[in-house]
């Protein structure tokens, strides 16, 4: 028996498949779960940021209000965090493609999204570190100028925490950027 | 040759009220009419039965979300395939992370020795299994074209769905026929 292209088409379309019925209720449920998960994740980030600022302000209230430079550092910290969150949302917020894109356009969109995520991480210390520098400077100056005797141990701990956090942050983002680049290279190999 | 209920999937020009009645009504109709082609599409892209179901659900979810944007500028069949193949192509890219096999183009696909086994009886199920395996080895865009060809869509429709030029689709279909002939030992 010779199998022609037409035979194959017919056989393909005759395939006995138990095509499952996917109900609208299920789709609504899936959409709801996705929406809730996104809201929870975003909410967690915002609430954590706000709660940290509030907790520090409340716990150290008397220390902070008695020192104008430290008070200004707290405000700069809030402004810096707000700027970082806005930049992050602008640069790395997930964009969804139009569902009806053609296959080629969908793949192009997928690649662009990978590039966007890579660029949001690669070298991003250039915008998030400067956003925190004024706050950190004000904090250290306040500890040197507004506290007597000079609290060398807290200053040392704070300096170590800043160096380690910034270093880990930069390393983490660069590693994530490299993973996105590997994904892009793999995608290009399929082009 | 097509098993698709064409008349039921190309909406009439006065289909506005149906769309206006809500995407849910439209979705129920589309999900019913395209259940089999979409299941075949999922099977062509994913060998694992459980993951096939996941992919199928992703496709249905994308379709449901897309239907409010449908404006009759193309047939419903083209729209459904475009959305479904868009989801499937992206799925292939993401699934590549957990795959170890290399995807190849139509030009590079190698035919297994058993391809010449065309003598007397080749069981249809076995033929389909081999065909599915062949499809799953292809790069996304070649994969889309061969599936759409097997579903008997025209070159113009395939071009519209994939974003390829019609001439490019024609070349790919010619190559597909050659590959199928070599694989299954039949006539073009």
Image (cartoon, coloured by chain):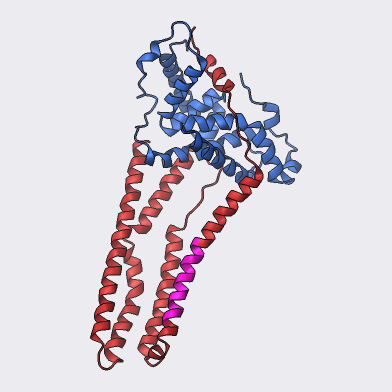
Chain colours: A red, B blue
Occupied quadrant, residue A134: bottom left
The spot of residue B17 in percent (x, y) is: 76, 43
- Residue A5 vs A101, above or below: the answer is above
Q: Which residues are magenta?
A: A41-56
The spot of residue B50 in percent (x, y) is: 50, 37
| Residue with the most extreme front position | B50
Instruction: Describe residue B18's horizontal placement relative to residue B3 as left or right.
Output: right
Quadrant where the C terminus of chain A is found in the figure: top left
**Which secondary structure is most common in the magenta stretch?**
helix
| Residue at 61 percent of width and 34 percent of height | A20
- Residue A137 vs B143, above or below: the answer is below
| Residue at 27 percent of width and 82 percent of height | A154
| Residue at 36 percent of width and 53 percent of height | A118
Membership of A101 in magenta stretch: no
Instruction: Describe residue A147's horizontal placement relative to residue B117 as left or right.
Output: left
Instruction: Describe residue B68's horizontal placement relative to residue B50 as left or right.
Output: right
| Residue at 42 percent of width and 71 percent of height | A83
């Amino acid at each position: 028996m010779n199998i022609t292209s037409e035979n194959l088409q017919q056989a393909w379309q005759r395939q006995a498949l138990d095509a499952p019925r996917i109900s609208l209720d299920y789709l609504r449920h899936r959409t709801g779960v996705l929406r809730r998960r996104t809201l929870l994740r975003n909410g967690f980030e915002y609430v954590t940021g706000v709660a940290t600022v509030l907790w520090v302000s409340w716990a150290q209230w008397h220390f902070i209000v008695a020192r104008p430079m430290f008070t200004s550092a707290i405000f700069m910290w809030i402004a810096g965090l707000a700027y970082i969150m806005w930049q992050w949302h602008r640069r790395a917020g997930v964009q969804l493609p139009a569902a009806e894109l053609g296959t080629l356009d969908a793949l192009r969109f997928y690649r662009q999204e990978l590039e966007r995520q890579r660029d949001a991480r690669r070298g991003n210390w250039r915008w998030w570190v400067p956003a925190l520098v004024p706050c950190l400077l004000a904090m250290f100056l306040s500890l040197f100028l507004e506290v007597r005797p000079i609290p060398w141990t807290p200053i040392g701990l704070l300096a170590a925490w800043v160096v380690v956090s910034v270093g880990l942050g930069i390393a983490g983002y660069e590693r994530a950027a490299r993973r996105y680049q590997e994904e892009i290279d793999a995608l290009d190999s399929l082009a | 040759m097509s098993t698709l209920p064409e008349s039921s999937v190309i909406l009439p020009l006065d289909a506005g009220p149906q769309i206006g009645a809500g995407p849910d009504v439209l979705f129920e109709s589309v999900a019913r009419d395209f259940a089999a082609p979409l299941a075949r599409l999922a099977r062509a892209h994913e060998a694992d039965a459980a993951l096939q179901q996941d992919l199928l659900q992703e496709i249905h979810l994308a379709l449901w979300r897309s239907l409010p944007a449908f404006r009759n500028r193309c047939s419903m069949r083209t729209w459904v395939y475009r959305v479904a193949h868009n989801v499937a192509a992206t799925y292939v890219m993401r699934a590549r992370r957990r795959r170890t096999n290399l995807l190849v183009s139509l030009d590079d696909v190698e035919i297994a020795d058993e391809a010449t086994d065309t003598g007397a009886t080749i069981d249809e199920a076995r033929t389909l299994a081999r065909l599915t395996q062949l499809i799953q080895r292809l790069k996304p865009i070649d994969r889309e074209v061969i599936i759409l060809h097997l579903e008997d869509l025209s070159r113009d429709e395939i071009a519209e769905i994939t974003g390829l030029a019609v001439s490019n689709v024609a070349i790919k279909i010619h190559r597909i026929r050659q590959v199928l002939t070599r694989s299954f030992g039949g006539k073009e």
